[in-house]
Amino acid sequence: MDLSTSYMGLQLPNPLITAASPLSRELDTVKRLEEAGIAAVVMYSLFEEEIRHSELELAHHLEASADSHNEALGYFPDLGHFHSGPDGYLEQIRKLKQAVAIPVIASLNGVTPGGWTAYAHKMEEAGADAIELNIYSIPTHPDLDAAAVEQMYLEDLTRVRQSVRVPVAVKLSPFFSSLPNMARKLEQAGADGLVLFNRFYQPDLDIENLEVVPEVHLSNSTSLRLSLRWTAILRSVVSRASLAVSTGVHTGRDVIKASMAGADACQLCASLLIHGPDHARGMLETVRQWLSEHEYESLRQLKGSMSLAKVPDPAAFERANYMRALREYR
Ligand SMILES: Cc1cc2nc3c(=O)[nH]c(=O)nc-3n(C[C@H](O)[C@H](O)[C@H](O)COP(=O)(O)O)c2cc1C
């Protein structure tokens, strides 16, 4: 069964990609993922804060009297025990490239205009086959309007796009007033792929200790719906850019759904964290079996068959179905 796909020009034997996560920290884990059939790996992100932190540290060492740097360093969030800094990150790209044959996609995570975008070039030099740009902005100031936020995304992308030759994907948030408009602008600014979506960290409140609790909640298959719908809508909005579904791909059937909606690739994180790398093998087997039982010859054959442009009832993705779903609830 032919499961091959092209993602941002990378020819992959199947659409399963490991999403940016701790799964790429250990070489052995990535080797096991490759053995289980994973077609590419997106590395955990290098964060803008890590880059700025290391630049400040360097300035501090170069100018012994610069107390201001010490003070500035104090403002940084705890970068955690995983923090290996930009050099460690580049080293991990090199190690992964030596350890496995599958494409390695480096992930750069930032917001504010600045030198951090130059790291895309260093990632490319270290061997990254593509860059995934995760622009993770949580606007909290009412003076910052939607157009300004969108412009920031476009400028970050343009800077990264200009500094590398490898493909660049943008991992998006679902929270735009008009996602199709934003998707088209990103494609016009040079995005080779859109990843739908990054899973915004949603803090909980500890009501006894009056603390905001940073906690990551893993997805399940139901979480796929948001990406599924937007993939179906964006399939006919973007013409050149690839689409990858991220969030809620847990089973082979989820992969079929994402492909029918129009996804070129599926990124997996929670399902692999929960079940381990071998889970990918079972998912691929389910996809093969399903396709053959339904007399398809390839996964490509069904790609986009249930996108907004192709379904017999496009209203199913729109407002009409929302009303129907609410009225028919028993
Ligand atoms: C523990 C953990 C770490 C993650 N780290 C990153 C990261 O460094 N960069 C990033 O873009 N996304 C990161 N993500 C988000 C995942 O790449 C993915 O988009 C999200 O988990 C949704 O996919 P899923 O439903 O398959 O888990 C992380 C997610 C988890 C659970």
Image: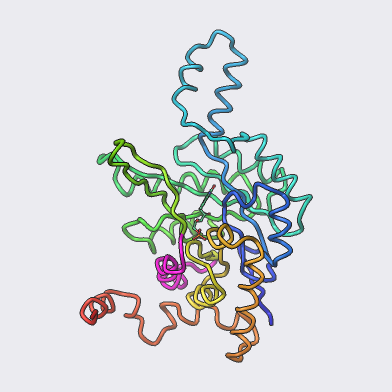
The part of the image, by quadrant, that contains residue 273 is: bottom right
Left or right of 54, for residue 210: left
Q: Nearer the viewer, residue 6 or 147?
A: 6
Q: Nearer the viewer, residue 136 or 26?
A: 26
Display coloring: rainbow
Outermost residue on the top side: it is 65
Give how far across and how far down residue 41 sits, in percent: 65, 57
Left or right of 118, for residue 33: right
Q: Nearer the viewer, residue 16 or 272?
A: 272
Give how far across and how far down residue 108 sits, in percent: 56, 45
Outermost residue on the front side: it is 208
Where 275 falls versus 87 (above or below)?
Answer: below
The part of the image, by quadrant, that contains residue 167 is: bottom right
Where 134 falls versus 67 (above or below)?
Answer: below
Prevailing secondary structure of the magenta residues:
helix
Name the quarter where the C terminus is drawn.
Answer: bottom left
Give how far across and how far down residue 139 sits, in percent: 33, 43
Q: Residue at x 61, y 59 (%)?
A: 18
The span shown in magenta is 219-240
Q: Residue at x 58, y 67 (%)?
A: 265
Where 264 falls versus 215 (above or below)?
Answer: below
Left or right of 300, for residue 155: left
Q: Residue at x 45, y 67 (%)?
A: 224
Outermost residue on the right side: it is 98
